[in-house]
Image (cartoon, rainbow, N blue to C red):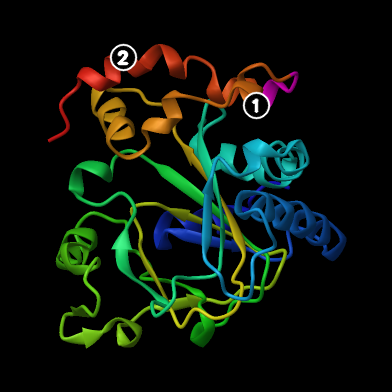
Amino acid sequence: MSLTKEQIDQFTIFGFVQLPQLFDPQEIGKILKVSDAVWASELGRAPQGAESLSISLFVEREPDLTELLVVDDRLYVPLCQLLGEDMIWSGSEGNRGFEKDNNSHHWHADRPNTRELGYLRVKAMIYLDPMRKETGAFRVIPGSHLSGFHECLQPMQSVHGESSPTFFGLEGAELASYAVETNPGDVVLFNQNLFHAVYGKTGSRRYIALKYAARPQTDEHLASLHRWSDYAFQPDKTYMDSDNKRLRKMVEGLMDLKSKAATLPYP
């Protein structure tokens, strides 16, 4: 289940790598059944159509999802290759649908600015519905996680929250980019410094996002985690007390760092 040298090079150079059909149809069926039940439990009823719902600490709620998605070799081993075997867990999301009258998520980086480029954070996107370029596929600007190019794109970060922004004089969907088209069972790993967007969302658009980071080595790393992922310092109790060594290792020691992280300045 290891990444090849070529796949690691793709991630390093372009900022993302696609892992086709990492999960088979039977497994996707199981993931969908459990995920739909979590969304329904949150709403008190089954979600309808493209009804929007985003739930944090999503896989932490369901041991079946944790076993299949978090500790299974197919994702755990590649992520250790990218982040190191002492990587940390920084939470999950379960997302479906989209907000009415807003079928776009404009260009942005999850962890923007030059100061963030030296600290690697990776998000794993597990798609449960087909995604195509014109119907809400994940779009990226390859290489935009790298110093030099990343800074050139900073003007996009400042306007991405506007309702109808333009980017260098272009509509977001017209900007030069790569659409990562996926089918259920595909996984995309991406560097959270990478500029990405979504246009043309349709249907239920269900996916699970898992978030990881290299274990912090400096005060700057701790300050960044506190700024962007403070929940990493409050791991789910079931993970801390788990019999699974992989889960415990990813969260060990994080609570002890919370008070220090809170005192550190973030430029």
Which residue is tagged 2?
A: 259
**Extent of the magenta region:** 243-247
Of tags 2 and 1, which is closer to the observer?
2
Three-letter amino acid code of the residue under disc 2 = Ser
For this view, does 194 lie left or right of residue 21?
left
State which quarter of the image contains the C terminus.
top left
Mark 2 neighbour density, 10 Å: few (under 14) some (14–19) many (20 or more): few
Labelled disc at residue 147: none
For this view, does 153 lie left or right of residue 93?
left
For this view, does 123 lie left or right of residue 217?
right
Task: Tell me which corner region of the image, top left, top right, bottom left or bottom right, holds residue 185.
Answer: bottom right
Of 59 and 140, nearer the camera is 59
How far is disc 2 from disc 1 in space, using C-alphas? 22 Å
Labelled disc at residue 247: 1
Three-letter amino acid code of the residue under disc 1 = Leu
Task: Tell me which corner region of the image, top left, top right, bottom left or bottom right, holds residue 251.
Answer: top right
In the rendered image, the residue lying farthest to the front is: 44
Of 37 and 114, nearer the camera is 37
